[in-house]
Amino acid sequence: MHQKSFRERVLEAYREQCAFCRLKHAELLDAAHIIPDSDELGEPTVSNGLSLCKIHHAAFDSNFIGVRPDFRIIVREDIRW
Ligand SMILES: [Zn+2]
């Protein structure tokens, strides 16, 4: 049986929208790991995934934005307007 990739499963769970800005162009969306896959807890499961557009994925990886364990989005203090 064909096993869907991490990206396919995460994008499907988020209805192919960016979790931050709701951009709906799948070709501009990535499946980001909440806990990085370099970490032993960073499993490629939907619960550890976020559907993010390229911009928000880069911002997430650079710690401009983050997600708390209760799923609230946090924006780094010093870049808020
Ligand atoms: Zn976005």
Image (cartoon, helix red, strand yellow):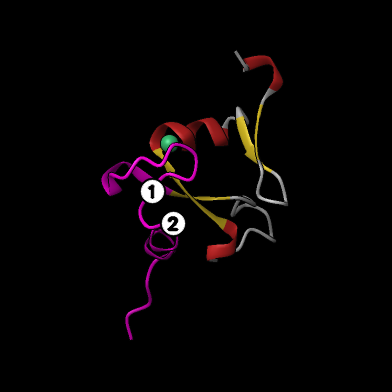
Circle 2 is placed at which residue position? 14
The range drawn in magenta is 1-30
Viewer-closest of 13 and 31: 13
**Eyeballing the image, is 17 above or below 42?**
above
Q: Secondary structure at mark 1?
A: loop
Residue 34 x %, y %: 61, 50
**Amino acid beneath label 1:** Gln
Pointer 2: residues within 10 angstroms few (<14), some, or many (20+)?
A: some
* Residue drawn where x is 60% and y is 13% of the image: 81
What percent of the width, then of the height, locates residue 3? Answer: 38, 77
Q: Residue at x 44, y 63 (%)?
A: 13
**Depth check: 28 or 74 in front?**
74
Look at label 2 and name its amino acid. Tyr
Place residue 60 in its image quadrant: top right
Which residue in the protein does label 1 denote?
17
* Magenta run includes residue 44: no
